[in-house]
Amino acid sequence: MAETWDEVQLIADGFERVHVELEWYSRPRAGLGDVDGKPHYFDADEYRVWPASDVVVELEREQWAIFARWNECCEAGTVKPETHPGRGGINALYDELALLLASYRQAPDDARLLVGEMRFDAGARYRVEGLDYWFRWLPTK
Protein backbone atom coordinates (compact mmCIF):
# COMPACT_ATOMS: atom_id res chain seq x y z
CA MET A 1 0.00 0.00 0.00
CA ALA A 2 1.22 3.50 -0.84
CA GLU A 3 2.28 5.91 1.89
CA THR A 4 -0.42 8.46 2.73
CA TRP A 5 -0.34 12.07 3.88
CA ASP A 6 -2.95 14.23 5.56
CA GLU A 7 -4.55 17.04 3.59
CA VAL A 8 -2.86 19.81 5.58
CA GLN A 9 0.58 18.36 4.84
CA LEU A 10 -0.22 17.82 1.17
CA ILE A 11 -1.25 21.46 0.80
CA ALA A 12 1.79 22.66 2.77
CA ASP A 13 4.03 20.65 0.42
CA GLY A 14 2.45 22.23 -2.67
CA PHE A 15 0.23 19.35 -3.75
CA GLU A 16 -3.12 20.07 -5.36
CA ARG A 17 -6.36 18.10 -5.43
CA VAL A 18 -7.46 15.88 -8.32
CA HIS A 19 -11.22 16.16 -8.86
CA VAL A 20 -11.93 13.73 -11.71
CA GLU A 21 -10.11 10.73 -13.17
CA LEU A 22 -10.75 10.23 -16.87
CA GLU A 23 -8.14 7.56 -17.55
CA TRP A 24 -5.90 5.31 -15.44
CA TYR A 25 -3.35 2.88 -16.81
CA SER A 26 -0.83 1.95 -14.07
CA ARG A 27 -1.15 5.57 -12.95
CA PRO A 28 -3.29 8.61 -13.79
CA ARG A 29 -3.23 9.31 -17.52
CA ALA A 30 -5.99 11.92 -17.81
CA GLY A 31 -8.30 13.86 -15.54
CA LEU A 32 -9.25 17.18 -14.00
CA GLY A 33 -7.26 18.63 -11.14
CA ASP A 34 -6.04 21.91 -9.74
CA VAL A 35 -2.94 23.53 -11.25
CA ASP A 36 -1.89 26.79 -9.63
CA GLY A 37 -5.12 26.65 -7.61
CA LYS A 38 -7.47 26.48 -10.62
CA PRO A 39 -9.06 23.46 -12.32
CA HIS A 40 -7.21 22.22 -15.40
CA TYR A 41 -7.47 19.13 -17.54
CA PHE A 42 -4.36 16.95 -17.70
CA ASP A 43 -3.33 14.06 -19.93
CA ALA A 44 -0.36 11.90 -20.99
CA ASP A 45 2.92 10.97 -19.29
CA GLU A 46 4.54 14.37 -19.08
CA TYR A 47 1.20 15.96 -18.56
CA ARG A 48 -0.25 18.51 -20.91
CA VAL A 49 -2.45 20.81 -18.82
CA TRP A 50 -5.03 23.40 -19.84
CA PRO A 51 -7.65 25.39 -17.95
CA ALA A 52 -11.26 24.32 -17.55
CA SER A 53 -14.06 26.86 -17.11
CA ASP A 54 -16.29 26.87 -14.03
CA VAL A 55 -19.22 25.54 -16.08
CA VAL A 56 -17.16 22.67 -17.48
CA VAL A 57 -15.80 21.84 -14.02
CA GLU A 58 -19.36 21.54 -12.69
CA LEU A 59 -20.31 19.22 -15.56
CA GLU A 60 -17.19 17.09 -14.97
CA ARG A 61 -17.97 16.87 -11.26
CA GLU A 62 -21.55 15.88 -12.02
CA GLN A 63 -20.41 13.04 -14.26
CA TRP A 64 -17.75 12.03 -11.73
CA ALA A 65 -20.38 11.89 -8.95
CA ILE A 66 -22.44 9.45 -11.05
CA PHE A 67 -19.38 7.21 -11.37
CA ALA A 68 -18.37 7.54 -7.70
CA ARG A 69 -21.86 6.59 -6.49
CA TRP A 70 -21.92 3.65 -8.91
CA ASN A 71 -18.48 2.55 -7.67
CA GLU A 72 -19.69 2.56 -4.04
CA CYS A 73 -22.62 0.34 -5.03
CA CYS A 74 -20.37 -1.96 -7.07
CA GLU A 75 -17.94 -2.39 -4.18
CA ALA A 76 -20.90 -3.09 -1.88
CA GLY A 77 -22.12 -5.76 -4.31
CA THR A 78 -25.47 -4.11 -5.03
CA VAL A 79 -24.70 -3.59 -8.73
CA LYS A 80 -22.58 -5.59 -11.16
CA PRO A 81 -19.44 -4.34 -12.94
CA GLU A 82 -21.18 -4.55 -16.30
CA THR A 83 -23.48 -1.72 -15.17
CA HIS A 84 -20.56 0.76 -15.24
CA PRO A 85 -22.03 4.04 -16.54
CA GLY A 86 -19.06 4.55 -18.89
CA ARG A 87 -20.17 1.57 -20.98
CA GLY A 88 -22.86 3.72 -22.61
CA GLY A 89 -26.59 3.22 -22.71
CA ILE A 90 -26.78 2.64 -18.94
CA ASN A 91 -27.15 6.13 -17.52
CA ALA A 92 -28.63 8.74 -19.88
CA LEU A 93 -27.25 11.72 -17.95
CA TYR A 94 -23.75 10.22 -17.86
CA ASP A 95 -23.93 9.65 -21.63
CA GLU A 96 -25.20 13.20 -22.26
CA LEU A 97 -22.41 14.67 -20.15
CA ALA A 98 -19.82 12.59 -22.01
CA LEU A 99 -21.00 14.09 -25.30
CA LEU A 100 -21.04 17.64 -23.91
CA LEU A 101 -17.55 17.30 -22.41
CA ALA A 102 -15.74 15.50 -25.25
CA SER A 103 -14.39 18.62 -26.97
CA TYR A 104 -13.18 20.19 -23.71
CA ARG A 105 -11.14 17.07 -22.93
CA GLN A 106 -8.97 17.53 -26.04
CA ALA A 107 -5.66 19.29 -25.34
CA PRO A 108 -5.30 22.59 -27.20
CA ASP A 109 -2.09 23.42 -29.03
CA ASP A 110 -1.05 25.86 -26.30
CA ALA A 111 -1.38 23.38 -23.41
CA ARG A 112 1.47 23.61 -20.88
CA LEU A 113 3.75 20.62 -20.37
CA LEU A 114 4.34 19.70 -16.70
CA VAL A 115 5.52 16.73 -14.67
CA GLY A 116 3.09 15.58 -11.99
CA GLU A 117 4.53 14.29 -8.72
CA MET A 118 1.84 12.21 -6.99
CA ARG A 119 0.98 11.59 -3.34
CA PHE A 120 -1.99 9.89 -1.71
CA ASP A 121 -4.27 10.93 1.13
CA ALA A 122 -5.89 8.40 3.48
CA GLY A 123 -9.41 8.74 2.04
CA ALA A 124 -11.38 6.34 -0.13
CA ARG A 125 -9.97 5.81 -3.63
CA TYR A 126 -13.03 7.15 -5.44
CA ARG A 127 -15.33 9.64 -3.79
CA VAL A 128 -17.79 12.21 -5.05
CA GLU A 129 -15.53 15.13 -4.09
CA GLY A 130 -12.48 13.67 -5.85
CA LEU A 131 -9.77 11.06 -5.57
CA ASP A 132 -7.21 9.87 -3.07
CA TYR A 133 -4.24 11.17 -5.04
CA TRP A 134 -2.90 14.70 -5.35
CA PHE A 135 -0.32 16.24 -7.70
CA ARG A 136 2.50 18.71 -7.25
CA TRP A 137 3.15 20.18 -10.67
CA LEU A 138 6.74 20.78 -11.77
CA PRO A 139 8.22 22.11 -15.01
CA THR A 140 9.61 19.54 -17.43
CA LYS A 141 13.38 19.25 -17.52
Image (cartoon, helix red, strand yellow):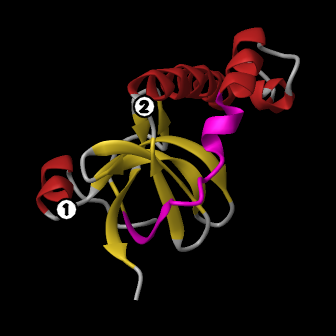
Q: Quadrant of residue 88?
A: top right
Q: Is residue 139 magenta?
A: no
Q: Residue at x 65, y 67 (%)?
A: 26
Q: Is residue 29 left or right of residue 46?
A: right
Q: Which residues are magenta?
A: 101-118
Say what amino acid the circle numbered 1 marks: Gly
The relative height of residue 56 versus residue 111 in the rendered view (above or below) is above
Q: Residue at x 70, y 35 (%)?
A: 102
Label 2 sits on a secondary structure element that is loop
Task: Give the image location of residue 103, x and y in percent.
Answer: 68, 37
Residue 14, label in figure: 1
Dot 2 corresponds to which residue? 53
Task: Give the image location of residue 30, x and y in percent.
Answer: 59, 53
Is disc 2 surrounded by few (<14), some (14 to 19) or many (20+) residues within 10 Å? few
Q: Is residue 105 magenta?
A: yes
Label 1 sits on a secondary structure element that is loop
The relative height of residue 112 versus residue 79 in the rendered view (above or below) is below
Quadrant of the image containing the C terminus: bottom left
Nearest the viewer among 33 and 118 is: 33
Q: Residue furthest bottom?
A: 141
Nearest the viewer among 51 and 64 is: 51
> CA gap, disc 2 to disc 1?
22 Å
Q: Is residue 10 left or right of residue 43?
A: left
The relative height of residue 22 versus residue 24 in the rendered view (above or below) is above
